[in-house]
Image (tube, helix red, strand yellow):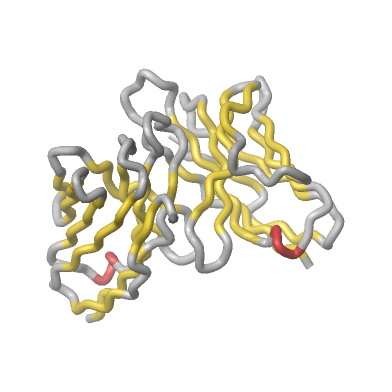
Amino acid sequence: RKEVEQDPGPFNVPEGATVAFNCTYSNSASQSFFWYRQDCRKEPKLLMSVYSSGNEDGRFTAQLNRASQYISLLIRDSKLSDSATYLCVVTPGDNFNKFYFGSGTKLNVKP
Amino acid sequence: NAGVMQNPRHLVRRRGQEARLRCSPMKGHSHVYWYRQLPEEGLKFMVYLQKENIIDESGMPKERFSAEFPKEGPSILRIQQVVRGDSAAYFCASSPPEGGGSYEQYFGPGTRLTVT
């Protein structure tokens, strides 16, 4: 079983839509969680860390569900510039320095 | 404040040659990580280094691949006797020293290796 699994998409949504991605992880001892964004042929860029209590940054909201072992990312009022691949990242147990990446969920925001 | 720097950005090697990829971490960062991304796939952890120490190399292929982070200079990922299957994007990331409260990793622009 993969450490991290994501729906590859693509998610095709109109501008202004709300879209949500989920990501499941296999190691119940995982401690740190992140969402990264990767544009085509570019490096991953940190979008936000995911905290146990959930966190919000502008139009982006991340949540963690430890019981079901998934994290989610909600994007409100989608912009054309949100089109990218969104990568879920989980660390194994108490090893905070080793990142496991999901394969990514592709988002296309259409005008 | 310069970000993570990698060079070269593109590297073409013929089968059997050696590839050397360089990474300079962000200023103040002492942890370096190497990842490989095959086309249409996610990033796969290869190795985690601190200055003069390999901390975790569990993702490194057993043969032909090596990494170092010397006291002075950039971290280097070395691939000997490259094969076509080594063609990929290799990303380096860095993070601040432990105790800083943050385990976020910041990525360089990557080196795209093509083996012909």
B87 relative to A80 in the view: left or right: right
What residue do we see at 44% from left, 55% from top? A2
A60 relative to A37 in the view: left or right: left
What residue do we see at 32% from left, 36% from top? A29
What residue do we see at 58% from left, 62% from top? B38
Q: Residue furthest right?
A: B16
The front one of B74 and A85 is: A85
In the depicted structure, whether residue B27 falls above or below residue B44: above
Q: Quadrant of the C terminus of chain A?
A: bottom left
Location of residue B49 by image quarter:
top right
Q: Give the image location of residue A45, x and y in percent.
A: 39, 50
Q: Give the image location of residue B73, x and y in percent.
A: 66, 28
Q: Give the image location of residue B50, x and y in percent.
A: 57, 25
A72 relative to A105 in the view: left or right: left
Location of residue B32 by image quarter:
top right
Q: Quadrant of the N terminus of chain A?
A: bottom left
The front one of B116 and A103 is: A103
